[in-house]
Image (cartoon, grey):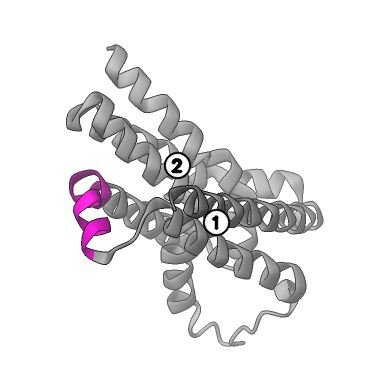
Amino acid sequence: MNPYIESFLPLFVAINALGVIPIYLAVTEGMTASQRRRLTLQAVITASLVAVLVLFAGQLIFSLLGITVNDLRVGGGLILLVLSTSNLIFGDFRRRDPRGEGMEEEGASVGVVPLGIPLIIGPAAITSVLVSREAFGYLPTLTSLVLNMLIVFLVLLFSPWLGRVMGNAVSRAVGKVSSLFLAAISVALIRAGIVGMIQAL
């Protein structure tokens, strides 16, 4: 059982499902329960597909594209920085169709980026998958990946209940504070990527 436990824990920490909740509540504000469920399912499926692809073909893809994990850190950090800045400055003025049209398309895009990638499966999780595969093999890594994705799905599925308990005003405040921390995390990712690039020279 040790390989499975040792493979599960780093990925669990890297994904940080609880840390995704405030951002999830912020980007899904105004959506119906069914739209949130579809978005949650799409985000988890997207993250799972990317993680499985990295597990079985990560090194090959990186080699073919000529990229490294450090490049991924910088790219993911830039995406998160744009997202967090946009939510901090323009979050209350997002355009909505008064008839509700276009919400499904918006939810679809949010489900892929940023929820699926890079919030659920980001550079830290991708690195964890690659390291786990080298250390413990494919089966323990795949098992830990499936368990972690199940945990993420359940956490996000029940997060609106937490939002209702906190109330609308508190949820918005938490979303803003989370966006601020997300901006800091994105800067840390970019910094780590640049430092890694310099050290690799």
Verify whether residue 134 appears in magenta. Answer: no
Nearer to the camera, 145 or 131: 131
Q: Which mark is residue 161?
A: none
The answer to whether residue 201 is left or right of residue 194 is left
Name the dominant secondary structure of the magenta segment: helix
Label 2 environment density (alpha carbons within 10 Å; few <14, some 14–19, many ≥20): many
**SS at badge 1:** helix
Is residue 32 shown above or below 92?
above
**SS at badge 2:** helix
Q: Which mark is residue 194?
A: 1
Magenta range: 52-64
Q: Is residue 100 visible?
A: yes
Q: Quadrant of the N terminus?
A: top left
User: Residue 109 occupies which quadrant of the picture?
Assistant: bottom left
| Amino acid found under the numbered disc labelled 1 | Ile
What residue is drawn where x is 71% and y is 56%? 175
The answer to whether residue 179 is left or right of residue 151 is right
Verify whether residue 62 appears in magenta. Answer: yes
Measured Cα–Cα span from mark 2 to mark 1 = 29 Å
Q: Position of residue 33 (x, y in %)?
A: 51, 59
What residue is drawn where x is 34% and y is 26%? 7
| Amino acid found under the numbered disc labelled 2 | Val
Q: Position of residue 9 (x, y in %)?
A: 43, 25
Q: Which residue is mark 2?
A: 152
Q: Is residue 28 visible?
A: no
Is residue 169 shown above or below 98?
above
What residue is drawn where x is 23% and y is 58%? 63
